[in-house]
Amino acid sequence: MSKRLILVINPGSTSTKFALLEEDVILFEKTLRHSIGELSGFRKIADQINYRKNLIMEELTKENFNLESISAVIGRGGVIKPIESGIYEVNRKLRDDLIEAARGEHASNLGGLIASDIAATIPAARAYIVDPVVVDEMTPVARISGHPEIERISIFHALNQKAVARLYAASVAREYEELNLVVAHMGGGISIGAHRKGRVVDVNNALNGDGPFSPERSGGLPARQLLDLCFGGKYTYDELKGMICGKGGMLAYLGTNNFRQVYEMADAGDQKAVLITDALAYQVAKEIGAMSAVLAGKVDAIILTGGLAYQESHVEKVRSRVEFIARVVVYPGEDEIRALAFNGLMAMDGRIEIKNYE
């Protein structure tokens, strides 16, 4: 039996990453860079579909791959309505929502659209998206914020959190749906989720000001002091949005979002850098503790992942505060290409259900 080919597409704001895999082996992988000038001619992000799709097809054709053998084309999920975790076949409703972008324009919206267009040209291929950032499995009690005008919402690194949770489950010969896990994704943003029997029942909003601060996001800020900044006349709305996401966190304190550089500063004796790295680890550990309470202390493992997990000193600072709760396992970085392909293989093997977007 010949092995199945999977094409994976992960669009970013100024790049398009894609890879062709034979089962779980990468045959070809490339990142296409797009200049601001090249993209400025497109009024909406959805208008870039053909431009990016044609570039991908040109590269694959140059490598002489037999594209007719592709079984699945998997795109990164976009900003659509809140949905349960899983793999979804791209249907008309999903395409319409990705194009309309009613919940926000984002380059990841192109993933499912390009996948759908490419799959339509290959007789045996089907198009899917997997675990977009809007995956929402929070319980009703977790949605309560403290005021009825504001509801807690689920925006987090669903793709990587779910992928490493399944990897850990496989490593201990268990099903993901049997375990209680706390997963901490630590990158440019930090999200920490309580995974109860295969569902993320609570998680901090990693994008819009909740949970620990990160290299460039402020995390949860004291509400009254934030109000004073909002109405003090010093900052515009857009400037304050930037303080929360993009220009906050470590960048605001130390002038850089380069985590490795900050640890080099700390190792060289910069006491402010020492304090901020300690504080980041402290806040991550505190949020892990909170999510462990969500699981009533019944935690099978704590998983640390994302780019910051490459920094061993940081990992040890977090581990020292939380290892009394459960075993700490580290999966550094995030491999979105493999995570997307991994989900595709599980779906084609019948190990997970292919869901219908409605």
Image (cartoon, rainbow, N blue to C red):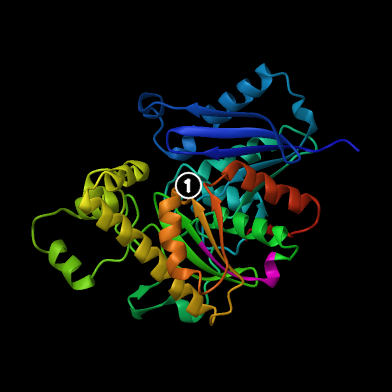
Q: Which residue is mark 1?
A: 310
Identify which amino acid the numbered label 1 is placed on.
Tyr
* Residue at screen point 37% across, 60% down: 281
Using residue 315 as the reference point, say whether residue 171 is left or right of it. Answer: right
- What percent of the width, then of the height, locates residue 23? 76, 40
- What percent of the width, then of the height, locates residue 194? 53, 70
The outermost residue toward the left is 233
* Residue at screen point 48% across, 39% down: 46
Magenta stretch: includes residue 180: yes
Using residue 223 as the reference point, say whether residue 298 is left or right of it. Answer: right
Q: Residue 119, relative to residue 84: is it above or below?
A: above
- What percent of the width, then of the height, locates residue 204? 42, 66
**How many marks can you see?**
1
The image quadrant of residue 316 is bottom left
Q: Residue 212, relative to residue 163: is it above or below?
A: below
Whether residue 151 appears in this view of the structure is yes
Dot 1: element? helix
Q: Quadrant of the C terminus?
A: bottom right
Give the magenta part as a residue range.
176-183
- What percent of the width, then of the height, locates residue 13? 43, 38
